[in-house]
Image (cartoon, helix red, strand yellow):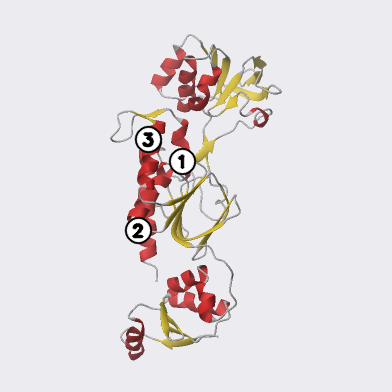
Amino acid sequence: MASVIIYSTEGCPFCSKAKSFLAEKGVVFEEIEARPRSKAWQQMRQKTGSGTLPQILIDGEPIGGYSDLVNLDATGRLSHRLGLAEKGPVPPLHDVIIIGGGPAGLSAAVYAARKVLKTLVITKDIGGQVAWTYDVDNYLGFSYIETADLIAKFEEHVDKYGLKKVVGVGVTDLELTGKIKKIVTSEAKTYLAKTVIIATGKRPRPLDVPGEKELIGMGLTYCSTCDAPLFADLDVAVAGGGNSALEAVIDLVKVARKVYVVSLTPLTGDEILQDKVMNSPNVEVFTEYKILRIMGDSAVEGIEMQSLKTGKVSKLDVQGIIVEIGLLPNSGLLVDTLETNRIGEIVIDSRCHTGVAGVFACGDVTDVPFKQVIVAAGEGAKAALSAYNHIINQR
C-alpha cells in the first residue's frame, strides 16, 4: 500500500474529516502536527506549495486537502493511487448538477457556466411551469412574448455555453449529505457532483376523487392553455376559484359552448378576472360546492358535486373538466433530507442554502414568496453563485 502523510493540527475540522475518511477506508497514514508557522508547517509549505491545512501526500506527492481527497475518491483515482482494489468505472464528477429545466434551473445553468463550473442539467422538460401558459407580459424587457418564444430564448442562452443536458428523464434517488452528491435517474444512470441545485418547480394539485386518474387525457386536464381548444363547442367544468381557475374560464369562453365554475369557496381570484367571468354569458358559477367524482368510462361524461351549504348532490353533464385548484411542490424525494414547510416547499435562506452543505434550491419548489418567472430566474442566479462560493471555499 502507498505511503500516506497528512499534515494537520488540533481543532481543524477539515483535518479531522480527512483522517476519518482515510481511517474508514483502512488506510494507514502518518500524521504530522503542523501548527501555523511552526517548523513542520514550513516543511509542509515547501513540499506542497500550500499553507492551508490539511495537506495530504501519497508516496511523497501532494494531492491537496480534504476536498481533493474526496474528489479523487469520487472519480476512482484514489484507489489507484493508494494501491487498493479498483472500483471499476466511475461516473465523471461535476461541479454542479441542476435538477430542473424551468426559469430557475436554466438561469442557474447560465450563471454556473459563466463561472466555468462543470455543469449538468437533469430535467423532465425544458420550460417548466411557464410552458403551461400561452404568453408572458411581465418579464423585464418583453412587454409581450409568447411562452414558446421565451422558452426558446432561455434554452438558446443556455446552449450558448455548451452545457450538458439530460432531458426527458426524472430523478429517482438522491444522496445529498456526503461530500460528493449522488443522483440516480429513471434511466438507472448515476451522476456525481460537488454541489446540487434543486429547481424542480411545482405540479398541479389533484382533486383526489374517483374517476380522476382514469380520465386524465380523456377530457380531464390540468392545463387550459394547452387544452382549451380541444373543448370547442362542448360543455366544460373548471374546478377552482383562484386566479388560475378564472384564467382557465376566460380561455374557455372563447371556444366552449358552456363553462361551469365549481369552487369549494367563494371566488378568490383578482376582481378584474371575477368581473370578466361573471359577465360572460356562457358561464355559470357554483361556489361552495365539492366535486365528488368524475363520471365516464372512456371519456368525461359529467361530474357529481355536493353543495356544502345544503348537502344536496347534483350532476353536471359536461364533456370535459379542467382542474385548477393550486400546485404542489416537487419535493417528495427531498422531504426526509431537507427542511420543508407545511406545504412541502423547501426552506432556504437568502442565499438559497437548504441547510445541507453543498445543496441549494431555487424557484417555485422553495418557500420564497411570489411565484413569478422573473423571481425564479433571479433565485436561480443566486443559487448558482452560492454553489460557486461553496466550491471555491472548500479545503
> How many labels, in total?
3
Q: Is residue 219 above or below residue 387?
A: above
Residue 116, disc: 2
Real-space Cα distance between discs 2 and 3? 25 Å
Check disc 1 and report its element: helix, strand or loop: loop
Q: Amino acid at mark 2?
A: Val
Residue 126, disc: 1
Q: Earlier in the sequence, mark 1 or mark 2?
A: 2
Residue 362 location (% of width, % of height): 42, 47
Residue located farthest toward the bottom when viewing the structure as drawn: 39
Viewed as shown, does residue 93 lie left or right of 236? left
Viewed as shown, does residue 184 lie left or right of 149? right
Residue 45 location (% of width, % of height): 33, 84
Q: Which residue is mark 3?
A: 150
Q: Going 48% across and 72% down the picture, which residue do you hit?
A: 72
Viewed as shown, does residue 285 lie left or right of 319? left
Q: Earlier in the sequence, mark 3 or mark 1?
A: 1
Q: Is residue 35 above or below residue 280?
A: below
Check disc 2 and report its element: helix, strand or loop: loop
Residue located farthest toward the left when viewing the structure as drawn: 141
Camera-side residue of 232 and 156: 156
Residue located farthest toward the right when viewing the structure as drawn: 297
Real-space Cα distance between discs 3 and 1? 11 Å
The answer to whether marks 3 and 1 mark residues whose Cβ atoms lie closer than 8 Å is no
Q: Earlier in the sequence, mark 2 or mark 3?
A: 2
Q: Going 44% across and 71% down the picture, which residue do you hit?
A: 67
Check disc 3 and report its element: helix, strand or loop: helix
Q: Amino acid at mark 1?
A: Ile
Q: Amino acid at mark 3?
A: Leu
